[in-house]
Image: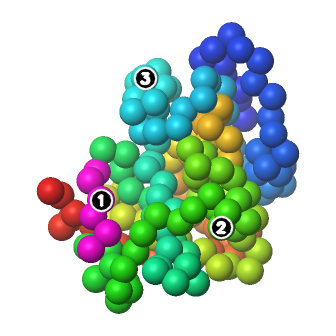
Amino acid sequence: MADDHLTDKANPVNAPEQTVLAALAGLGVAYRRVAHAPAMTMDDLADIDRQIGVPHAKNLFLCNRQQTAFYLLLLPGDKNFRTAVLSRQLGVARLSFAGPEPLAALLGTQPGAVSPLGLLFDRQQQVRLLIDRDLAGVKSFCFHPCSNTASLIMASRDFLGPFLRLTGHAPTWVDLSGAAD
């Protein structure tokens, strides 16, 4: 486990991030934590990705029209996304972006820091994890640790194995190849 800093600013670890880091330590999962300036969007992460050599996955928190079903979609950061393609695969009439209240309640984070590491806080498994098949072959994942002022790099086998087993979430692999404009 390592801790890098891409900025000189103080970068305290918030409570949700502490919980994530403690869970990873408890599992014996190796990771590299990189502190950086707040990064709210994929564009904000572009320079960080170049510096650390691992691209962040795009993480989208979605829901159905009634806001009774929630989904966390992981896809390559540079891949386009159209809700219609995913809605058809899931058999859901209409998907949209979920708001900040369910994001905080279910994943322990806020907009701009959406992360599958937040599944640790979804103890009732109310969020369905969806992963685009284009991520199936990656060796490492890079995610915010429920804070947009740091990123964690970990082996994909550790995320897909011990971490997801701990959370009780099994991924559903989806094919978003029809999502290009």
What residue is at 75 percent from the left and 24 percent from the top?
A: 11
Tell me the magenta residue range. Answer: 79-84
Main SS of the magenta part reads loop
Q: Residue under circle 1?
A: 81
Q: Residue at x 47, y 79 (%)?
A: 64
Amino acid at circle 3: Asp
**Residue where numbered disc 2 is placed:** 102
Left or right of 177 in this view: 9: right
Residue 171's place in the image compared with 79, above or below, is below
Please rate how many residues cluster around mark 2, counting C-alpha atoms within 10 Å: few if below 14, some from 14 to 19, many from 20: some
Query: For mark 1, does the 10 Å Cα neighbourhood hold few (<14), some (14 to 19), or many (20 or more) residues?
Result: some
How far is the residue under mark 1 from the one under mark 3?
A: 22 Å
| Secondary structure found at label 1 | loop
- For mark 3, what is the residue? 47
Count of marks placed on residues: 3
Q: Tag 3's secondary structure?
A: helix
State which tag comes first along the sequence, 1 or 2.
1
